[in-house]
Image (spheres, helix red, strand yellow):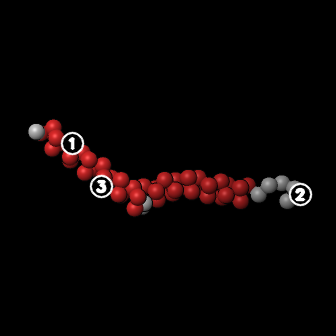
Amino acid sequence: MLGGINNSLFLQSFGGVLALGLIIPLMRWAFETPKAKAERLQRRALKKSLRRLKAK
């Protein structure tokens, strides 16, 4: 190939970068960290206590 670029290899690597760009947010959404779950439970408990205070 007299110094040219391999277009199929370039497009394949570019497609891999785009695929990672889609997979990373999907995986972060699907598998939450335990810390995020604990924060959500704490927020839920806080909202529940606020509702009880408003009801009085």
Can you tell which quarter of the image residue 32 is in? bottom left
The answer to whether marks 1 and 2 mark residues whose Cβ atoms lie closer than 8 Å is no
Which quadrant of the figure has residue 15?
A: bottom right
Q: Which mark is residue 41?
A: 3
Q: CB under 8 Å between callouts 2 and 3? A: no
- Residue at position x 25%, y 51% in the image: 45
Element at label 3: helix
**Residue lying at 30% horizontally and 52% vertically, measured from the top left:** 42
Residue type at mark 2: give it: Leu
The foreground one among 54 and 24 is 54
Type of the residue with mark 1: Leu
Could you tell me how far apart the alpha carbons at marks 2 and 3 are, in whole angstroms?
Answer: 62 Å
Distance in Å between CA atoms under marks 1 and 2? 73 Å
C-alpha span from label 1 to label 3: 14 Å
Q: Position of residue 41 (x, y in %)?
A: 30, 55
For the residues carrying marks 1 and 2, which lies nearer the camera in this image?
1
Q: Which residue is mark 1?
A: 50
- In this rendered view, identify the residue nearer to me: 25 or 32: 32
Left or right of 52: which side holds 25? right
| Numbered badge on residue 2 | 2
Q: Is residue 12 left or right of residue 22?
A: right
Q: Nearer the viewer, residue 5 or 45?
A: 45
The crowding category of the residue bearing disc 1, from other C-alpha atoms within 10 Å (few below 14, some 14 to 19, many at least 20), is few
Query: Which marked residue is nearer to the observer: mark 2 or mark 3?
Result: 3
SS of the residue under disc 1: helix
The image's mark for residue 19 is: none
> Local crowd at mark 3 within 10 Å, few (<14), some, or many (≥20)?
few
Q: Residue 33 in the image: x percent, y percent?
A: 42, 60
> Quarter of the image containing the N terminus?
bottom right
Q: Amino acid at mark 3?
A: Leu
**Quadrant in which residue 12 is drawn:** bottom right
